[in-house]
Amino acid sequence: MHTFYHAGHTRHDPAQLHRPDTPYTNIYYSEVARRGTIIYEALKAADFGPITLPGDFGIDAISEVHDHEMITVLRTAYERMLREVGRQPAIPETFSVGHIPGHKLQSISGLLGYYCFDTSSPIFEHTWDVVYWSVQTALSAAALVLAGGEKVAYALCRPPGHHAAGNLFGGFCYLNNAAIVANWLVQHGQRVAILDIDYHHGNGTQAIFYGRSDVLVCSIHADPLQEYPFYWGFADEYGAGAGRNHNFNFPLPVGTQEPAYVAAYDEALSKIRLFVPDIILISLGTDTAEGDPVGGFKLTTATFSRLGAKIAAFDRPVIVVQEGGYLLSSLGENVVSFIRGLLGQ
């Protein structure tokens, strides 16, 4: 298996915002740079195959999924916040809740509140460069699989991306790595099924493909009645228009253990089997592990191997895009376990 990894991801590190005087530290800023280096070291030790830098596929694949003005906000917010407000990083303090401005916004504070839906995605000096290369990491894995160079490729993306919609970012996510890859693959004649197994619903991925029939989206996640992102991810969200019956959510209660999780997983796999994809894209979040500070399921390290093995049984090319996973003590082990199952080890 070929892994793509960009070590420059460490230049975006919300760990610098950790404050001992707030009880929210582990919730709002758990997506720290150490996550990427921990996974990298675990993969290197596992010796699955080469680990290389991604290539540069440019901005076009990003622009085809995300609004131009949102991209501009991500690129310029840090400097504009310093210039207009006199502080950094760029974090919204007010939100355009249910309101579409009738005039073109000019203030960076207003733009942040329009395009960002929470306070967990700070924009630092190098954030744009890091999220750009996170996308290129995913595209590199897709290009390798598309060319037939590997049947399985892993994109060690950081930051993650599945909460970012075409015109929204949040939830530690800025650009939707998985959605950009899926859209790119469709443009190259591929039929793509996305299986999102992060603890939290991939609301951004759902929104991007909700009206489309060329990409199937299945997500297994915590019930939004109980857990973030709260407003998306219910079982009755099936897609719209051409996308009807191409979006399937499998919300599960907090505290779910392996038997109930695997039952939902098998149901999602049955949807994928009926779709007959050319390529399966896994949005891999290991925050479903027991004890994860941002999760609430009780999956074990061994569970991840069994989940990977079920994907291997499809005998289809697979691209794995890293999403969440915040239990640093076992993060690398859990990712490696999933890949071992996927590779039949």
Image (cartoon, rainbow, N blue to C red):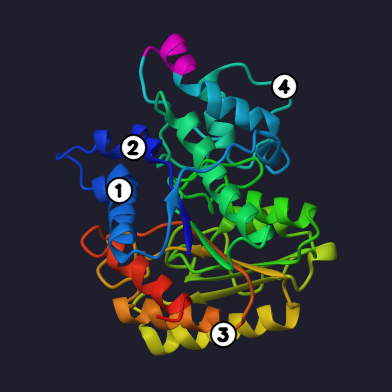
Q: CA distance from mark 4 to mark 3?
A: 53 Å
> Total of numbered circles in the picture?
4
Residue at the (64%, 85%) spot, across then down: 270
Amino acid marked by disc 3: Ala
| Circle 1 SS class | helix
The segment highlighted magenta reads 79-86
Discs 2, 3 touching: Cβ within 8 Å: no
Q: CA distance from mark 2 to mark 4?
A: 37 Å
Discs 1, 4 touching: Cβ within 8 Å: no
Q: Which residue is mark 1?
A: 37
| Circle 2 SS class | helix
Q: CA distance from mark 2 to mark 3?
A: 35 Å
Residue at the (59%, 42%) spot, across then down: 168
In the rendered view, does 8 fall on the left or right side of 189?
A: left
Q: Earlier in the sequence, mark 4 or mark 3?
A: 4
Name the spot of residue 283 as percent of width and height, x first.
Answer: 52, 62
Q: Earlier in the sequence, mark 1 or mark 3?
A: 1
| 41 versus 133 height, above or below | below
Rendered image: mark on residue 103: 4
Q: Earlier in the sequence, mark 2 or mark 4?
A: 2
Rendered image: mark on residue 10: 2
Amino acid marked by disc 2: Thr
| 223 versus 40 height, above or below | below
Front position among marks 2 and 3: 3
Front position among marks 1 and 4: 1
Front position among marks 4 and 3: 3
Q: Which residue is mark 3?
A: 313
Discs 2, 1 touching: Cβ within 8 Å: yes
Most distant residue in the right direction: 242
| 7 versus 44 height, above or below | above
Name the spot of residue 171 as percent of width and height, x first.
Answer: 45, 48
Discs 1, 3 touching: Cβ within 8 Å: no
